[in-house]
Amino acid sequence: MSKNFLTIMALLGATACAMTSCRTSEANYRAAYEQAVAGREDTSGIDNTVYDKIRREAVSSYTVYEGDSIPLKRERVALADPQPEATLRPAYVIVAQFKQKFNAGSLATRLRESGYPDATVLTTREPLYYVAIAAGDRTDMILRCREIAAKPPVAVKAPYPLVLEPVGKR
């Protein structure tokens, strides 16, 4: 009986030692965190992915119109849901950008229902989805961008609204 008792006690002791020795500590978490932070080289906010080149190709600048700076972007885009005989216009006023087509389409639908019948969704190769509220020639879109910036139909984040000029075909 004492032999079984000693065997059981030895097994319990070994189990208790194994359970307490495998625990992580705050020092382990801190070391792992610091190593992960040190490994980050790119602080530009752009992922090091195959889409990095596409994002960098998009030219962002400003145009001055009557003393006012208007954000202007040139990028390869296409209509997300092209209708028959629909073509890209020379310029668009963009109010939002999404990574999911559903979200962009939902906002475009709400904008059409609230009095912006030209609201449409444009897509890039990445794909990113831009919600355009107006389309036309560059000068008209600069004027519309100023109007929309003064009284936006939806909550917009910087750098929106902006004028987007499509470049070539996607």
Image (cartoon, rainbow, N blue to C red):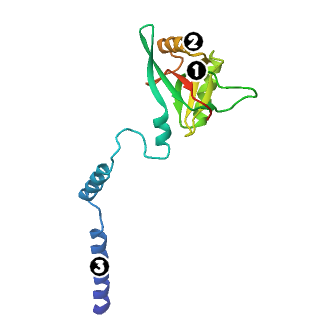
For the residue carrying disc 3, how many other residues have a C-alpha within 10 Å: few (<14), some (14-19), or many (20+)? Answer: few
The secondary element bearing badge 1 is classed as strand
Q: CA distance from mark 2 to mark 3?
A: 79 Å
The secondary element bearing badge 2 is classed as helix
Q: Which residue corresponds to the image point at 52% horizontal and 30% vertical from the top-left?
A: 97
The front one of 37 and 44 is: 44
Residue 61: horizontal and vertical position, in percent?
A: 44, 23
Q: CA distance from mark 1 to mark 3?
A: 73 Å
Q: Nearer the viewer, mark 2 or mark 3?
A: 2
Q: Which residue corresponds to the image point at 31% horizontal and 82% vertical from the top-left?
A: 11
Residue 148: horizontal and vertical position, in percent?
A: 52, 14
The front one of 147 and 54 is: 54
Q: Seen in the image, is 65 located left or right of residue 170?
A: left
What mark, if any, has residue 60 been given in the picture? none
What mark, if any, has residue 14 been given in the picture? 3
Q: Residue furthest left?
A: 27
Q: Residue furthest right?
A: 84
Q: Amino acid at mark 2?
A: Asp
Q: Nearer the viewer, mark 1 or mark 3?
A: 1
Q: Is residue 33 above or below residue 61?
A: below
Q: Is residue 52 above or below residue 112?
A: below
The residue identified by callout 1 is 91
What mark, if any, has residue 140 been given in the picture? 2
Q: Seen in the image, is 36 located left or right of residue 150?
A: left
Which is more N-terminal, label 3 or label 2? 3
For the residue carrying disc 1, how many other residues have a C-alpha within 10 Å: few (<14), some (14-19), or many (20+)? Answer: many
Q: Amino acid at mark 1?
A: Ala
Quarter of the image where the N terminus is located: bottom left
The secondary element bearing badge 3 is classed as helix
For the residue carrying disc 2, how many other residues have a C-alpha within 10 Å: few (<14), some (14-19), or many (20+)? Answer: some
Confirm or deny contact between disc 1 and disc 2 (CB under 8 A).
yes
Which is more N-terminal, label 2 or label 1? 1
